[in-house]
Image (cartoon, grey):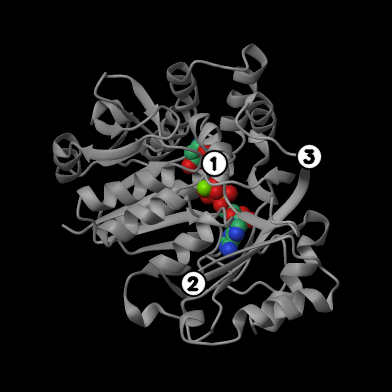
Amino acid sequence: MKTVVLKFGGTSVGNIDRIKNVARIIASYKKKKFGVIVVSSAISGSTNKLIKKTKELSNNFDPAEYDVLLSSGEQASCALIAGRLKHLGFKTRSWMSWQLPIITEGPYNSSRINKINKNKISNYIRSGGIPIITGFQGINLENRVTTLGRGGTDSSAIMLAKFFNAYSCHVYTDVNGVYTTDPRNHHKAKKIDKISYDEMLEMASLGAKVMQPTSVQDAKINNISFSVKSSFTKNEGTLITGNKKAFSDKIITGITSTKNDAKVTMIGVKDKPGVAASIFKPLSLNQINVDMVVQNISLNSKETDLTFTIKSEDLKKTEKTIKQNKKISFRKITYDNNVSKVSIIGVGMITTPGITYRMFQALASKNINIMVISTSEIKISVLISNKHIKKAIAVLHKEFKLD
Ligand code: ADP
Ligand code: ASP
Ligand code: MG
């Protein structure tokens, strides 16, 4: 029997009518004689509500308890889906991840699945049942519940598709697929029919919330093609695949932006060997992830100015770490929490000259100042003031003929 994995995101199970609708989608696959594995997120908003409670109780909530708490949302939505399918006459039941089990490794809050025990689910499917499995969670070797990072049900779906050698994997969400840019930010965004793992990975990592970055990495490593589609419409969706034919004929495939970056600028840092290491080592020891970095040599070449970006949630910790760092001296430091990173992504830029220039020119034509630049083989990112985000996306979308 061919098995399909169906993943439903938070908004797809967001209310009673939507849960009924999800049950109809599941039933349609079952009627086509597929073995069906369902994996669901928590009802939209419920994970955020739980996180808020932990923050009210402690600014350092125990990570293991945090995972026990957060994983509870998925238990509820899976029971609701299974209850509805039972009502419709199907053989079905919910499965918590520990009941399989789904084994994870790595730290609490951002664990990764490394093994799924198939036996119980395979037998259940063979007996005609539809398992409804909690996304976003697993258990570790200490037998404790873990979670996979925000949006982690995407990873659960990809890894279920891998371990069950699924015929296909469909990620149902609240938009028709992956778009050239977030359709909620730009009305001219166009749905992409097919996209490569590499481009999807860059888009997800650079702010396209539609897929969790880790899940795309899992898909790429294990060569699991999957589709992203809407649970509200019958639209075809987007295929994410390693197949070369998926490469678009456009130079730029997508544009992304981030919301939660912050910029730190240190002016007049004494310039001597090892200075950058003495700044960044304590940051990394405090789990602060530094993203973009630029360093300018000052005119007398004894001092340098250093700018770098971090997540805004790490800003306070960064300020504290720099203050406590006795190994560096500088004249002045400034922090800016109102910045965003805008990126253009596309494998086409490898073979097409002049993309950087076109990007900068387009932004300049709208008087948008670029603060920091970073590039890789298939993306160019710039840091700009976040008040210009919409304007920047619109002008780049037009410049690279995505409108
Ligand atoms: P789910 O709850 O189904 O996991 P998410 O909220 O995590 O859904 O992801 C879907 C959202 O991602 C969409 O509502 C959309 O606003 C956002 N998004 C951001 N960038 C893109 C993009 N390039 N294409 C499609 N959606 C995007
Ligand atoms: N419920 C989790 C979250 O909100 C996991 C998911 O939705 O994929 O992050
Ligand atoms: Mg999601």
Image vertical order of residue 191 relative to residue 286, above or below: below
Q: Residue furthest top?
A: 57
Q: Nearer the viewer, residue 84 or 165?
A: 165
Q: Are marks 3 and 2 in contact (CB under 8 Å)?
A: no
What residue would you read off at disc 1? 289
Q: Amino acid at mark 3?
A: Arg
Sequence order check, earlier mark of 2 and 1: 1
Q: Residue at x 23, y 31 (%)?
A: 100
Sequence order check, earlier mark of 3 and 1: 1
Residue 393 appearing in the image:
yes
Residue 182: horizontal and vertical position, in percent?
64, 62
Q: Quadrant of ligand 1?
A: bottom right
Residue 356: horizontal and vertical position, in percent?
62, 78
Residue 274: horizontal and vertical position, in percent?
52, 43
Q: Secondary structure at mark 1?
A: loop
Q: Amino acid at mark 2?
A: Ile
Indicate the quadrant where residue 17 lies. top right
What residue would you read off at disc 2? 378
Q: Residue at x 53, y 29 (%)?
A: 286
Q: Relative to residue 9, is residue 190 drawn left or right? A: right
Q: Secondary structure at mark 2?
A: loop
Q: Residue furthest right?
A: 367
What residue would you read off at disc 3? 331
Q: Secondary structure at mark 3?
A: loop
Residue 346: numbered disc: none
Question: Which image quarter is the C terminus in?
Answer: bottom right
Indicate the quadrant where residue 390 lies. bottom right
